[in-house]
Image (spheres, helix red, strand yellow):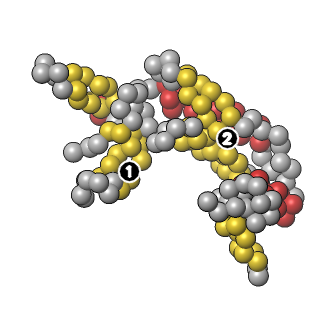
Amino acid sequence: MNWCERCERNEAKVHLKMEATSMHLCTNCYNQLMAEELEVDLDQLLESFAMKDGQGVSRTFYVERRVNPIGIYLEAVENIEFGYKFAVHGELKSNQQELLSKLMEKVRKGIREQQVETGVFPNGQEYNTVINDQLKGLIEYDASSEGTPLVINTGACHHPNFVED
Ligand SMILES: [Zn+2]
């Protein structure tokens, strides 16, 4: 893990290059520097929240903020591997609490609909079907299956790794 060069306490997640300086920073330090530079106030925001999905399963999200010269980026990242991720963008001077509300609304809508259904064949083998012929997810490279795209379906309830064939 790379440590933040400014506070030396948190994981460095941002590589900042400005004029002659180049620094690896954690999100907090990065935001503080950018906020000073861009004259933006950093509102106190929730660090995490939990919400129930369409199946009544409670899901926990961490809120990540990034202040960029082109605006403020807020992301909600679920606390599990291959979990949900949602993001919203706002202008630099936008109300950050409102932006957070927008993000939470997006999460609420996004996790409400179930996209993959699990069924069982008469021989006991399980299968996945895509509801409404729609699947939203991340396409990632899976090193263990040659050349097969791995679709990480963020909407699956019991089978987070839905492999498309
Ligand atoms: Zn730091």
Q: Residues within 10 Å of mark 1 (few under 14, many from 20)?
A: few
At label 2, which amino acid type do we have? Val
Of the residues shown, which amino acid type is indicated by label 1?
Ile
Q: Which label belongs to residue 43?
A: none
Q: Is mark 1 within 8 Å of ligand 1?
A: no
In-front residue for pair 54/70: 54
Residue at image location 77% in from the left, 38% down from the top: 45
127 and 2: which is toward the camera: 2
Specify the quadrant that holds the N terminus: bottom right
Taking the image as shown, residue 93 lies to the left or right of residue 162, namely right
**7 displayed left or right of 145:** right
Whole-number angstrom distance, CA of label 1 to CA of label 2: 23 Å
Q: Is residue 38 visible?
A: no
> Under tag 2, what secondary structure?
strand
* CB under 8 Å between discs 1 and 2: no
Q: Which quarter of the rendered picture does the C terminus lie within?
A: top left
Q: Which quarter of the figure has residue 77?
A: top right
Residue 139: image tag = 1
What's the residue at 24%, 58% (across, down)?
A: 146
- Give the residue furthest to the bottom: 20
Give the image location of residue 51, x and y in percent: 59, 25
Horizontal side of 52 relative to 140 (left or right) equals: right
Rendering coords of residue 136 (x, y %):
40, 40
Front residue (pair 37, 49): 49
In this figure, which residue is indicated by the disc labeled 2? 63
Percent position of residue 88, x then y: 63, 45
Judge whether residue 140 can be spotted in this image: yes
The x, y position of residue 135, in whole percent, is: 36, 38
> Residue drawn at (76%, 55%), measured in percent from left and top?
9
